[in-house]
Amino acid sequence: MKRSPLRFAFFGSSLVSSYWNGAATYYRGLLRALAGRGHTITFYEPDAFERQAHRDIDDPSYARVVVYPGDDDDAALQQVEHAAKTADVLVKASGVGVYDRLLERAIVEARRERQLAIFWDVDAPATLARMRDDAGDPFRALVPRYDAILTYGGGEPVVRAYREFGARLCVPIYNALDPDTHHPVVPDPRYAADLSLLANRLPDREARIFEYFFTPARRLPGRRFLLGGNGWGPAAPEPNVRLLGHVPTAEHNAFNVSALAVLKAGTAEQIARRARLHYGQWRGTPIGHWRARVEALLPDGLARPVVVTDLPDAPVYWYRPEDEEGWDRAARAAGPTVRLVPPLDNLLFSRARLGALFGLDYKFEAYTPAAQRRFYFALPVLYEDAVAGLIDARLADGVWQIRGIELRRPVPSEALRAGVYRVARLAGAEKVAVTTRTTREIRRALVGRCDG
């Protein structure tokens, strides 16, 4: 008996842009295959993280794309209500980046009789860890209300873990890659290199990339290294490393076949999570066991411990030996120095660690709906041995625009100016402007040309 085609309403990060969105290729292969079987797809994506300005593809023939505001809860809920009136299957994907908790609940509450509600998890280890680590996570109670949990891989350990949280059905859907778009091609001289890496700059992978990509580049000055992905600009730390910025998915084939070798990087924590998920009992073996196993595999001297004896339980942190030289230079610098810390710096990756060391409850608010944000791209201001405040800034048309500033303790104007201008020059700005309310003294210190 022939089954009738279904109408899918799919709420995900983005189908048309891979900008800060690695799930795009998975969605494209998956939804194109569904459409090829006669089903109708409507993909709902928020206008967030500049993805619409960095589209890789036009609206595809296999799906209708609906773009809704990325800073309006009511607009998101309206799209869910509209989808519930017409769709047979409502799908909420993980990692939309905005409205995630809102949509997780809205999908199951909007579902009508004979409609299916599916949660499609494109990062099951992260979602499961989130629920395991937070007994108050609202998604715990929502899992049993979904008709099915579909995951981007994970195997039996993921299925078992989701069942422990009450999932009715959990099925892994592996690597929905579209062979019509991802296939061998002729090497492209634009991407010729001895070693290439395609990775956005994120806190949980940055240290490994410096160790296994930038360190070899420094040791092999006669070799060519190529790095694609967001967040690494404007200048590479080594002269033989060429930065590409965002590489559209249409260029991935050429990128991956044009180098002598291509590097894939993960963190010890990522490997530990996956080792625990795939090889350990979900609730039986603690993450510390797997982290220790991974650390035992690291070469001697790759990292050195620092014990902070004046904090509760004397926590142990790790640093790279090659960083010592930079610390010595900073210690010898004349006078007090202001440093602005980028939001993706490893120092800010752990909110608990940052709070313990500096007494700062910091949150990277790019993933927070605009109406709920205090800042967007806030940079902590380090002065002497404390966090002196926050500065919210961004580059626009060659101007480093300071859109918010909040100082928790006094900072000398000249030191503040030097720290701000150091970052502005690195960003490629020609001048600095202050577009928020602040004191006359701070405005006078910060406004000006970067070459002045």
Image (cartoon, grey):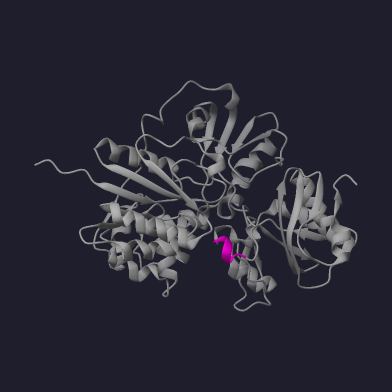
Q: Is residue 109 visible?
A: yes
Closest to the observer, 229 or 393: 393
Per the picture, the main secondary structure of the magenta-coloured stretch is helix
Q: Position of residue 95 (x, y in %)?
A: 45, 55
Q: Quadrant of residue 316?
A: bottom right
Q: Residue at x 49, y 32 (%)?
A: 252
Asked if residue 242 lies left or right of residue 422, the reply is: left
Indicate whether residue 452 is drawn in magenta: no
Say whether residue 371 is magenta.
Answer: yes
Identity of the residue drawn at 90% across and 59% down: 334
Seen in the image, is 43 located left or right of residue 451? Answer: left
Write the start and end of the magenta stretch as one range: 369-373
Q: Nearer the viewer, residue 107 or 342?
A: 107
Where does the image place residue 283, in percent across and percent down from the top left?
Answer: 36, 68
Give residue 373's quadrant in the image: bottom right
Query: Could you tell me residue 297's position as x and y percent?
Result: 51, 53
Determine whether 32 is above or below 399 in the image. Answer: above
Instruction: In the rendered view, tell whether residue 442 sits above or below residue 176.
Output: below
Please give the name of the residue rendered at 36% of the width and 38% of the height, measured from the top-left corner. 29
User: What residue appears at the point 70 percent right and 40 percent down from the top-left corner?
Assistant: 236
